[in-house]
Image (cartoon, grey):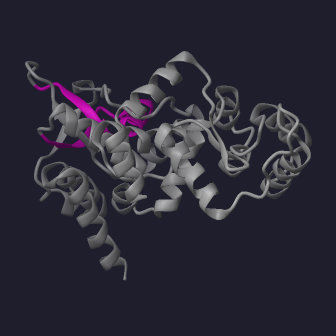
Amino acid sequence: MAEEKKKGLGRGLSALLGDHAASAIAAVTSAAAAGPEGAAAIKGLRILAVGQLQPGKFQPRRSFDEERIADLVDSVREKGILQPLLVRPLPGQTERFEIIAGERRWRAAQGAKLHEVPVIVRDLSDREALEVALVENLQRQDLSPLEEADGYRRLMDDFSHTQEELAKAVGKSRSHVANMIRLLALPDPVKMMLERGEITAGHARALLTAADPLRLSKDVVARALNVRQTEKLVNDEGKAKPTSGGRPANVGKDTDTLALERDLTSMLGVKVAIRSLGKGGELVITYGSLEQLDDILARLSAAPAAREDLDRV
């Protein structure tokens, strides 16, 4: 069963990235599984000095948790680097390489005073390097929710991948990918609370449907509410609060309307609400800055492609 899943994941990566880029990720994974002796047979495996490497310009991570790096340093001291870094040669610089995947391991190696690290060298274009860096990070379990969400969004925006393709490639469900992308529609202060660990991704998803996510998020933190309690808080607010025009809020949305709201939110990267007003209704798009508004307009200008994406979700 495990072998079948591994093969399926490989097909998903090749379909997403192409054989050349997918083989780079597969080589790193295979080397880690084979151990020091078996890894020697992996094409492109080399031992390089730590000083020959530099961080990649396509690093998807926004920050590095120093406490987790410290834990990794302890592990490296005890066991060494178990999974090779993925690197590419720097143009015009002899024996200098850019890290595509594995910057945390490189940092930990420096903290553990190692002079050399195992790497797999691949000639990757800028496009391939960015795509591989995003996908390799998404396959790992230590990204923050917003880093994961931003990774999916960049792969969709920059490379026109669908949610279904991404789900297959990283071994997640399509609904998981869609739910993570929705987090990007939260107001920036709420995102910061999520990044700091004051609320969880579950809290954040519940707050997406709130009329005032920031106000309720502060209430959630102050009262130490769990996810279920947060969902109830948001639901109760929706039932009680009238709209600005004095009309009662639309709390009885059907499943199709809610699904369409989710898809539009995912497509535009910001919160979208659909309100029924008799025979017609309102489509409310919430943005937090002029930059976000510019991004929305750019996405809407690609209307044929957007409609095609919606047909596929």
In the displayed structure, would residue 286 be above or below residue 12?
above
Residue 285 falls left or right of residue 61? right
Seen at 69% across and 52% down, the residue is 202
Q: Nearer the viewer, residue 49 or 140?
A: 140
Dividing the picture into quarters, in which one does residue 284 lie? top right
Question: In this view of the protein, can residue 112 be seen by the observer?
Answer: no
Seen at 31% across and 78% down, the residue is 3
Residue 287 point in image, percent of width and height: 60, 27
Dividing the picture into quarters, in which one does residue 232 lie? bottom right
Q: How many marks?
A: 0
User: Which region of the structure is painted magenta?
Assistant: 95-122
- Magenta-drawn stretch contains 98: yes
Residue 164 falls left or right of residue 145? left
Residue 46 point in image, percent of width and height: 15, 43
Dividing the picture into quarters, in which one does residue 167 lie? bottom left
Quadrant including the C terminus: bottom left
Residue 161 point in image, percent of width and height: 32, 49
Residue 44 point in image, percent of width and height: 11, 47
Quadrant including the N terminus: bottom left
In the displayed structure, would residue 298 be above or below residue 39?
above
Question: In this view of the protein, can residue 200 be seen by the observer?
Answer: yes
In the displayed structure, would residue 312 be above or below residue 194?
below
Seen at 17% across and 55% down, the residue is 23
Q: Nearer the viewer, residue 201 or 207?
A: 207
Q: Nearer the viewer, residue 300 or 65?
A: 300
Seen at 22% across and 51% down, the residue is 17
- Magenta-drawn stretch contains 101: yes
